[in-house]
């Protein structure tokens, strides 16, 4: 009977350790974010702006974002915070998205802008050939786990 108890407790500790590692590793390996002056300068060049909110249908205590998001034809700037996690991507979508199901339904029409590796502000270059006026929303998505993080409608 003791060995069953040990298997259960050691298994639970292993699962908890892996889960904690998945959550903490992106924080430990995240590059330094842009300095506040660079963020503000990039945001001032924006053609569009919007705000991320923690109150979206698909957000929860582990998957959220807040702050402002600014878009120009050359770059996208986020001033705020994101819940840390692995394999985040920033997408533009042709319609507002606020949960996993809605994003998955539109993902084939979305354009991936780039990887989100920082959780306290970021600046991403808009790839050549992407016209931000053809879309109306920004979505942060966890590719590895298929999780919605946050979104904002900018036009």
Image (cartoon, rainbow, N blue to C red):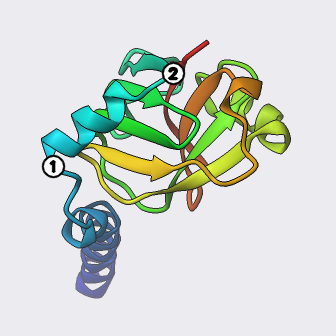
- Secondary structure, mark 1, is loop
Neighbourhood count class around disc 2 (C-alpha, 10 Å): few under 14, some 14–19, many 20 upward: few
Considering only order in the chain, which callout, 2 or 1, is on the residue closer to the N terminus? 1
The spot of residue 80 in percent (x, y) is: 25, 32
If the image is split into quadrants, where does the N terminus sit? bottom left
**Residue 151 percent location from the top left of the image:** 51, 27
Residue 67 spot, x, y in % from top left: 29, 25
Task: Tell me what residue is drawn at x 30 percent, y 60 percent.
Answer: 23
Q: Quadrant of residue 19?
A: bottom left
Of the pair 151 and 94, the residue shown nearer to us: 94
The residue lying at 70 percent from left, 24 percent from top is 133
Residue at label 2? 47
> Considering only vertical position in the picture, is 142 above or below 46?
below
1 vs 2, front mark: 2
- In whole angstroms, how far apart are the C-alphas of marks 1 and 2? 21 Å
Residue sitting at x 83%, y 38%: 109
Q: Which mark is residue 130?
A: none
Residue at point 61% right, 12% down? 155
SS at mark 2? loop
Residue at the spot of label 1: 35
In the image, 5: left or right of 106? left
Q: Does residue 66 appear in the picture of this structure? A: no
């Amino acid at each position: 009977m003791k060995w069953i108890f040990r298997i259960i407790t050691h298994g639970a500790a292993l699962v908890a350790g892996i889960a904690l590692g998945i959550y903490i590793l992106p924080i430990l390996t995240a590059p330094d974010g842009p300095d506040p002056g660079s963020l503000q300068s990039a945001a001032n060049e924006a053609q569009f702006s919007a705000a991320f909110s923690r109150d979206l249908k698909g957000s929860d205590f582990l998957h959220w974002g807040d702050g402002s998001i600014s878009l120009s034809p050359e770059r996208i700037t986020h001033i705020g915070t994101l819940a840390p996690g692995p394999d985040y991507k920033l997408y533009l979508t042709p319609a507002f998205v606020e949960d996993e199901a809605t994003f998955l339904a539109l993902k084939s029409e979305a354009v991936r802008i780039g990887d989100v590796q920082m959780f306290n502000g970021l600046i991403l270059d808009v790839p050549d050939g992407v016209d931000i006026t053809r879309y109306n929303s920004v979505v942060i998505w966890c590719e590895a786990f298929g999780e919605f993080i946050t979104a904002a409608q900018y036009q």
